[in-house]
């Protein structure tokens, strides 16, 4: 079954408009809120994205088989549809534009487990124990959607879903670019900012990415989401070659927990496997022990890669600002805004953005 993208997008826009200040279906409001709660308490929010996709498919065509989500695995089923494509091309961009959360911010939500491995929604693909309650509840909602008699009923469900998920869209304070800050002050603020709440590595990764934006330019720096199973980057933050954008020039691993020599070697081997010749680790834990830098450099040299270890924030911040194409005070000012944007990208807590701006004052 082919679902027209333009028509699907128009439908989402229409239901999003209705979801503001209009009479909504109370039952689907409750159901969307319950799934949201279960996903917040569990380990996966991808189930939210799938439910929204299923609602959209049913609203577009009442014959859609919401369990036959991969047409290649259902060649004899005329009602099979590509959930991954519908989500990626319609729901993801419109959720960002219209201001409602589908749980995850990646470009391909259904490229994650368990959906990536499924041939059919109910094929028994294992689900992480921490997300089982949310998945089971979502499955009950999909069965209910499948049994709806009209497309209008599915539209009402989608409208309620959008209304509920609008409340889960993070609202961030904006950054004031009219700021003067010394490199030394910036380093001090970064240390305090990460110390207060590491957020599982999100804050440190955002800081490193923002500093590299100053050095290499935003268009060359890639920074994946924390613990993203679909991530194909060699490091937490990577820099593309300016001459060959398809080539990784540098890969940087960011660690706010103590790093052992074996961790360095594992990362180095990953870089070799992915064709990266320049690797670095930014180690910012207060409990980080000194490593044998010479021995590790010799090990890296035998692999044919360059290896740089930054222990603490001071050296990394200083080097990133020094190698920027403008004076260090100007580079520090730009870094503040880039770090702010990277915090939004990695989905740091809204209060983290507030803290970042407060520390700068």
Image: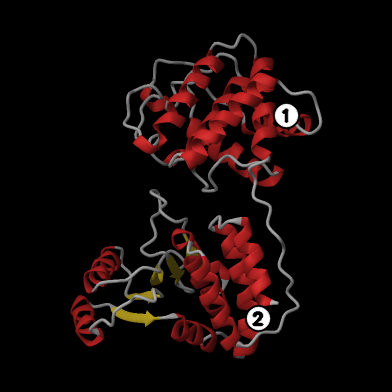
Structural crowding at the residue carrying mark 1, measured as other residues with C-alpha within 10 Å and reported as few (<14), some (14–19) or many (≥20): some
Image point (51%, 48%), residue name = 106
Tell me the tag on residue 333. 2
Q: Which colour style is shown?
A: secondary structure
Q: Please state the total of marks drawn on the protein image.
A: 2
Residue 75 location (% of width, % of height) = 39, 20
Q: In this view of the protein, can residue 127 be seen by the observer?
A: yes
Q: Is residue 177 left or right of residue 85?
A: right
- The residue tagged 1 is 15
Image point (53%, 45%), residue name = 104
> Based on the displayed image, in which of its 4 quarters is residue 264 positioned?
bottom left
Q: From this viewpoint, which residue is outermost toward the top?
A: 149
The quadrant in which the C terminus is found is bottom right
Residue 267 location (% of width, % of height) = 28, 67
Image point (24%, 66%), residue name = 266
- 222 over 67 or under it: above or below: below
Tag 2 secondary structure? helix
> Based on the displayed image, in which of its 4 quarters is residue 95 positioned?
top right
Q: In this view of the protein, can residue 9 be seen by the observer?
A: no
């Amino acid at each position: 079954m082919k679902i027209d993208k333009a028509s699907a997008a128009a439908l989402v826009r229409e239901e999003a408009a209705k979801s503001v200040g209009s009479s909504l279906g109370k039952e689907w409001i409750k159901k969307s809120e319950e799934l949201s709660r279960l996903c917040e308490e569990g380990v996966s929010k991808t189930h939210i994205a799938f439910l929204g996709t299923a609602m959209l498919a049913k609203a577009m065509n009442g014959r859609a088989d919401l369990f036959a989500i991969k047409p290649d695995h259902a060649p004899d089923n005329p009602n099979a549809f590509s959930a991954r494509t519908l989500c990626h091309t319609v729901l993801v961009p419109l959720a960002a534009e219209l201001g409602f959360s589908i749980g995850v911010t990646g470009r391909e939500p259904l490229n994650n487990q368990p959906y990536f491995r499924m041939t059919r929604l109910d094929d028994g693909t294992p689900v992480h124990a921490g997300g089982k309650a949310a998945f089971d509840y979502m499955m009950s909602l999909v069965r209910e959607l499948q049994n709806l008699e009209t497309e209008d009923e599915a539209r009402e469900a989608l409208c309620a879903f959008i209304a509920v998920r609008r409340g889960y869209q993070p609202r961030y304070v904006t950054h004031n670019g009219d700021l003067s800050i010394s490199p030394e002050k910036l380093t001090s603020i970064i240390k305090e900012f990460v110390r207060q709440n590491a957020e599982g590595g999100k804050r440190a990764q955002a800081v490193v990415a923002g500093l590299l934006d100053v050095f290499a330019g935003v268009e060359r720096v890639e920074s994946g989401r924390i613990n993203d199973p679909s991530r194909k980057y060699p490091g937490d933050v990577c820099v593309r070659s300016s001459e060959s954008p398809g080539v990784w020039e540098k890969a940087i691993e960011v660690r706010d927990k103590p790093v052992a020599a074996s961790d360095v070697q594992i990362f180095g081997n990953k870089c070799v496997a992915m064709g990266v010749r320049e690797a670095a680790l930014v180690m910012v834990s207060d409990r980080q022990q000194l490593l044998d830098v010479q021995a590790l450099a010799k090990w890296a040299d035998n692999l044919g890669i360059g290896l740089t270890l930054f222990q603490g924030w001071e050296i990394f911040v200083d080097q990133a600002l020094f190698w920027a194409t403008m004076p260090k005070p100007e580079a520090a000012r730009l870094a503040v805004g880039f770090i702010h944007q990277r915090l939004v990208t990695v989905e740091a807590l809204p209060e983290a953005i507030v803290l970042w701006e407060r520390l700068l004052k």
